[in-house]
Image: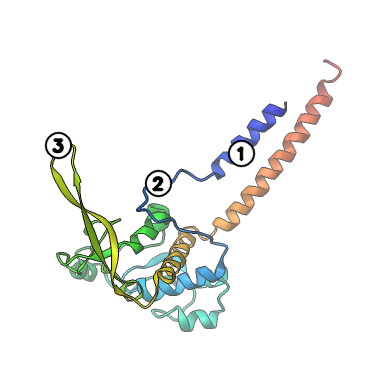
Amino acid sequence: MERIIFLFVIALLWPLTGSATSSDPSVYKADVDITDKASLQRGARIFVNYCMGCHSASYMRYNRMGDDLGIEESILQSNLMFGTEKSGDTMTIAMQKEDAEKFFGIAAPDLSVIARSRGADWLFTYFMTFYRDDSRPFGVNNLAFKDVAMPHVLWELQGIQKPVFKIIEREDGTQQEVIDHLELETPGLLDSDGYQNTVNDLVNFLVYVGEPAQIQRRNVGVIVILYLLVLLVIVYLLKKEYWKDIH
């Protein structure tokens, strides 16, 4: 019986375990903690000031964000709401799709569920690996998203990176020049640690936006599992009591 209970517990807890992540050393690892309201508040500020010129988060309402992140409505309206005066409005932008396609060649996607689509580590890596590429329309490229159509909007914080190349040998014996790593060419307003912390706050906020109710969902999930474990014990004891005269 103990083995059955053990297997049952494992089956219940298995969905809560994280999936395997990439072992690629070029992939940055995001330190996501959506219970850290200070981080989420800083991430919201970065998102509104640097991302919402082109990207919306149309599934999120300002007042929901304010309530979840502990931001008073007066502060919310004066510091995070630039396109509307109604806190119940969604986080949309004024840029029309046609204008975006004319400016960038493609309309900027809504970022409401980008963290669920791409993953936190991918987003962190994306914001960390812009580099100078004079052949591109905006003068930058990206290791995570080759030939990206987006400018590096956080360049003044990070600075400008340049690629450092190396020669590798292909299986057919020919040689190819590839990017080995990125090197800071022009410093930004933040040092390396400061910029990584800023990017982590932004990614943390995007993870929250992707599913604002996930904290409540996880708490409810723990309660349900505990309830099922207690119910399992009760049912087992009831079964023993019911069959004791027969066995």
Instruction: Find residue 82 and report its image quarter.
Output: bottom left
Task: Please report whichever mark, 1 or 3, sits nearer to the chain's N-terminal start.
Answer: 1
Q: With respect to residue 212, does 96 lie above or below?
A: below
Q: Which mark is residue 172?
A: 3
Marker disc for residue 12: 1
Outermost residue toward the right?
245
Amino acid type, mark 1 = Leu
Q: Nearer the viewer, residue 231 or 1?
A: 1
Relative placement, left or right, of 98 versus 55 is left
Q: How dense is the environment of label 1, judged by Cα within 10 Å: few (below 14), some, or many (20 and up)?
A: some
Which of label 2 and label 3 is nearer to you? 3
Q: Pick whichever of labels 2 and 1 is earlier in the sequence.
A: 1
The residue type indicated by label 2 comes to Ser
Which quadrant is the C terminus positioned in? Answer: top right
Determine the CA span between mark 2 and mark 3: 27 Å
Q: Residue at x 40, y 56 (%)?
A: 28
The crowd level at tag 3 (other Cα within 10 Å; few <14, some 14-19, many 20+) is few
The quarter of the rendered structure image containing the N terminus is top right
**Residues at marks 1 and 3, CA–CA distance in whole angstroms:** 49 Å
